[in-house]
Image (cartoon, rainbow, N blue to C red):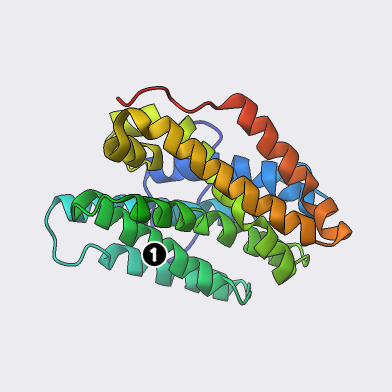
Amino acid sequence: MTGLPLLPASRHARVGVHPLGVAHMVMDDVARYYLPIHGLSSRDDLPDYTLLTFIEALICQGEEQMEQAAKDGQADVYAAWRDSKAQIRDLLRERQIEHPRIERYLEGTEAFFVQIHALVYRGELTHTNIVEAMECAPSDFRLLHVIVGEMLSSPCSDGLLDLLEPLEVLRDIHWHLAHYRDDVEHGLFNIYDMFSRLHGGDAPARVRAEQQRLEQVLDQRLSSASPSARAAIEPMLRAYRERMAEVSVPSAAL
C-alpha cells in the first residue's frame, strides 16, 4: 500500500502489512474527527504521525492474532495482545506521554477483543453482547485522541471526552458499515456482520435503532454541555454528518 509511514526504529515490535494498512485508514479518521478540536486541519500537523500509526497497527495486529489463536484452538488467545499492550506502554513511556485515560482505553480495547471472542468463537451471539462490543470498539480511537492531546500539549477535559463518547461509537458503527462486505469476504470481525447473523433481515432496522439511541444520548449530553464544549465538538459533528451521507446500512446480509 502506498503512502504508509515508516515504522519507528524500536526494539519493541514488528507489525504486518495488513494491520499497518488498516492503521493508516484509521489515522485518516483521527485527522478528520479529532484534529479540528485542537485547531488543526491536516494529519501533517501532527508531531508524530508515525508513532500514532504504529500504535494503532499494534492494536489491529493484536486483534488479528487473537482471532487466529482462537481459530487454532490455542488455550491463551490473548497472549500476543498482552505483549502488544506492553509494547504500547513502553513506547509511550519512552516518549514521556502520559494521560490518566491511557490505561482505561487500553483495557477497553482488550474488552473489545474479549467480546469478539465471545461472539464469534464461544457462540455467545446475543444482542447484549453485540452492543457491549459496539460500545468498546472505539477504545483504540479514544486512545489515539488522548495521545494526540498530550503530543500537542492540548489535552481535552474529562467532560469533553465524556461528551464525545456516543459520537465515537456512532463513528465506529459507520466504519463497520463501510467495511462490512470487505471484512466478511476476508473473514474479519465486523459489528454489522454480528447484527446480520443474529437478526437476519431485521439487521438494518436493529442497527438503525442503536444509532437512534446513541444520537439521543448525544443530544442529551449536548443539551447540558457548556457552549464552549458544544463549539469544540462542532467540527466532529460535521464530520459525522458527512459520514452519514456517505455510508448507508446494507439492505441484506451476505
Name the residue: 32% across, 26% down: 253
Name the residue: 66% across, 64% down: 162
Disc 1 residue crowd, few under 14, some 14–19, many 20+, Cα 10 Å: many
Q: Quadrant of the C terminus?
A: top left
* Image coords of residue 157 (percent x, y): 74, 69
- From the image, tell me which residue sits under label 1: 110
Q: Is label 1 in a helix, a strand or a loop?
A: helix
Q: How many marks?
A: 1
Q: Nearer the viewer, residue 240 or 79?
A: 240
Asked whether, in this view, residue 143 is left or right of residue 160, the answer is left
Q: Locate residue 142: give its quadrant.
A: bottom right
Q: Nearer the viewer, residue 112 or 167?
A: 167
Identify residue type, mark 1: Glu
Q: Nearer the viewer, residue 109 or 9?
A: 109
Residue 49 shows in this picture: no
27 over 177 or under it: above or below: below
224 over 213 or under it: above or below: below
* Image coords of residue 153 (percent x, y): 77, 67
Residue 184 shows in this picture: yes
Asked whether, in this view, residue 42 is left or right of residue 205, the answer is right
Q: Locate residue 191: give its quadrant.
A: top left
